[in-house]
Amino acid sequence: MENVSLTIKDLQVGHYINLPIGWTSHPFILNSFLIKDEKQLRIVQYLGLDTISVDLSRSKLAQPPTSASLQPAPIDPASADKLAQQQAALKGRQEQQTELAQQQAWWKQIRHTRSKYQDKLTLLKDVYSKLSLQPEKAMEQLELLAGELTIAAEQQHDFSFVLCNEELSSDSIYQNAMNVAVLSTRLALQISFNAQDVAIVTQTALLSQFGMLWVPPSIRNKRSELTKPEVNYLKQHPAYAVQKLQGVDALTDTVIHSILQINEKFDGSGYPRGIKQDKISKYAQLVAIATRYNEMCNANLPQHRYSPHLAIGLLFKVADKHYNKAYLEQFVKMMGIYPVGTIVSYDNNQGQVQMSVIDSLRQPLIVDFNELEPIKKQPLLRHCATDNITIAKGISSNNIEPEYLAKFNLVQRRNLYFPS
């Protein structure tokens, strides 16, 4: 093999060439071939290359060409138009393939993330089941799970959260706890808690629903309004958790006390003890925000369930009264104007936010309700920044066509996990 680099003007019929571009960018079957005639030569000359690699050992020329070689043969207008059309078609195919590859990469990331989310739910359920009878084993698993969440929250991606809204068979207790843990861990990192504080926050959040195991399913899963006695029973779940967890030696008092305080509010209107701001730990203050946000997005009753963008707004309205305003401001910054799961209206279309973009409050990745990806015919994902999409507003699922509710799982939960 004897390769030399020639300028395009020195190229001749009979040269064996190696094209330095992808097969989608030219009309030839292979990238390496012998130029057989003037037509092939002209096509190569109009590919926009300055130089090209020639294998002289496989070329059918007696001598290597010199700079005095023949200039490219003139091409008639009709042939030029045809060549331009071919190049435009090639460019179009290349752009379509690039877009398809991006769509596949996004959907792969979403599917992988949803699988991870379900794996973590399984592990959390195992922790809850072992805390009373096998506390040492349960704590090993809890620390492992908390560490994995922290590592996932620290990893750098283009996106911060992924929507995991498929039907899940496990009890909503574990989904609620996992959602609170995901949000709390990321918020603790955003507020710049140190590593020990982040660990306390994550463990507190993961165990935030443990007391619910002692609330009858007929109450915690009720699909109608709770009676006053049922509400009072439900509000004791933090106390039930503390009662059961005090016997777990490896669990710190800080975590146990924070679990008790998650549902307290700064003005004393929370539960189970009605304590005020100065008595609530900073860990409970943080987890409280994630807990209330999850409750509003995933309430059992439709009339108590809010779109994520409305939940953010309602939380902020009571910031001074109920929550740590500085923490809540960071939470809003973290979630964005249109958090994951929000149904949005834009350019006379509708879609749902699938992934939120880091450092962008208004330009998430959305799934388009009105258009399918042209090749595989799966739902089309659109990046608001790349596609210059301006979201007009967030909308309620009550304003969505019934066919979309089923097709895009819009009546399911708004579970979140970190992108994988």
Image: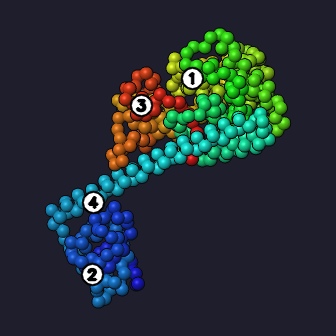
Residue drawn where x is 33% and y is 46% of the image = 374
* Three-letter code, disc 1: Ala
* Three-letter code, disc 3: Ala
Label 1 vs label 4, nearer the camera: 1
* Three-letter code, disc 4: Gln
- The mark that comes first in sequence, 3 or 2, is 2
Image marks 3 and 2: residues in contact by CB distance under 8 Å: no
Residue 316 in picture, x, y percent from top left: 60, 22
Residue 2 in picture, x, y percent from top left: 40, 84
Residue 328 in picture, x, y percent from top left: 64, 27
* Three-letter code, disc 2: Gly
Q: Label 3 to label 4, Cα distance in Å?
A: 43 Å
Report if residue 351 is visible in the image: no
Q: In which quarter of the image is the N terminus?
A: bottom left
Q: Is residue 88 above or below residue 349?
A: below
Residue drawn where x is 35% and y is 35% of the image = 370
Q: Is residue 55 above or below residue 401?
A: below
> In the rendered image, which residue does mark 3 sit on?
406
> In the rendered image, which residue does mark 1 sit on?
299
> In the rendered image, which residue does mark 4 sit on?
87
- The mark that comes first in sequence, 1 or 3, is 1
How many C-alpha atoms fall within 10 Å of the one at disc 3: few (<14), some, or many (≥20)? few
Q: Label 1 to label 3, Cα distance in Å?
A: 19 Å
Judging from the image, what secondary structure is the residue with disc 2 in? loop
State the residue in front, 125 or 378. 125
Q: Quadrant of residue 212?
A: top right
> In the rendered image, which residue does mark 2 sit on?
14
